[in-house]
Amino acid sequence: MDKKTAISKIRKCLALSKSANEHEAATALKQAKALMNKYGVTDSDIQTAEIKEVHAKASAKRRPADYESNLAVAMAKAFGCEILFSSSRIFQGQWTFVGEEVSAEIAKYAFTVLLRQLKSQRQRFIEEQCRYLRRASKTRRADLFCDGWVRMVYQTAKQIAPERKSDALVAYMRKQYSDIEEMAGRDRNEGRDFSYQDLAAYRAGEEAGESVKLHHAMHGTATPQQALLSAN
């Protein structure tokens, strides 16, 4: 038996140790302690074992667009997860949602579905509202649209899931990623004075984001697709 398998057995024993049957509870607790001693498993190992890392492809190799980063951060925060980005010179970059298994899966699923929708609505906004602008201005104003969109989607998402990060997640991040660096964004509107058209682009994003429908399933055993059914 390896340490990972031992941890799984220990967790089952600890669950049984809460049994109303005193004999069963005592036996399970004794077995858990024996396994911990035999395989060198600590309380911290048990606590962090419930944390999983779930991956989603990014749209860039090294530096994703700010609106994509904002959406990844928003979904991680809304579902009580941490978010990491791994860059590559050859392959597509990767987002990693870190959290309790179901939360991480839902956050990843939400991000994947919503990113497709955001890209589609961003392109439509450019074609319909930015037709006569220079390329740089189109991109900048579309970014504002996306900022408004992500803000409203985040407001919706956080209503169906707790934002609080679990103690286990905090311990896991401290143990596994204590030296991780914060990724620098690329805000194309930083330091600019917003015009009426800029503010209108942001409000248009908010209005579009308000139409996104997210809802949680009624049962805790739901798959991510059932737990977060659609973004229409």
Image (cartoon, rainbow, N blue to C red):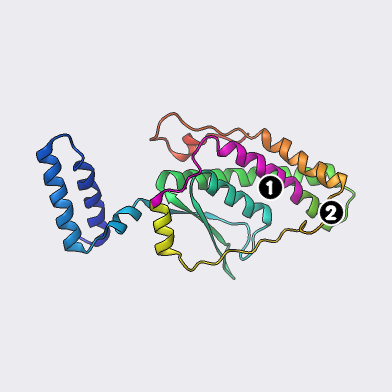
> Residue at point 14% right, 57% down?
34
Q: Is residue 197 left or right of residue 97?
A: right
- Judge by depth and name the residue closer to the eye, 119 or 63: 63
As measured in the structure, the alpha-carbon distance from the residue carrying label 1 to the one carrying label 2 is: 25 Å
Residue 137 occupies which quadrant of the picture?
A: bottom right
Magenta segment includes 106: no
> Residue at point 26% right, 60% down?
42
Q: Is residue 203 left or right of residue 11?
A: right
- Amino acid found under the numbered disc labelled 1: Lys
> Which residue is under mark 1?
119
Count the marks. Answer: 2
Residue 199 occupies which quadrant of the picture?
A: top right
> Which residue is under mark 2?
193
Under circle 1, the secondary element is helix
Residues shaded magenta: 143-167
What label does residue 171 carry, if any? Answer: none
Above or below, 111 relative to 19: below
- Amino acid found under the numbered disc labelled 2: Asp
> Residue at point 86% right, 45% down?
197
Mark 2: few/some/many CA within 10 Å (<14, 14-19, 20+): few
- Judge by depth and name the residue closer to the eye, 85 or 192: 192
Under circle 2, the secondary element is loop
Q: Nearer the viewer, mark 1 or mark 2?
A: 2
- Judge by depth and name the residue closer to the eye, 101 or 77: 77
Q: Position of residue 93 (x, y in %)?
A: 57, 62
Q: Which mark sits nearer the N-terminus, 1 or 2?
A: 1
Q: Is residue 152 left or right of residue 30?
A: right
Q: Residue furthest bottom?
A: 89
Rendered-image quadrant of the N terminus:
bottom left
Q: Position of residue 184 (x, y in %)?
A: 64, 64
Magenta segment includes 162: yes
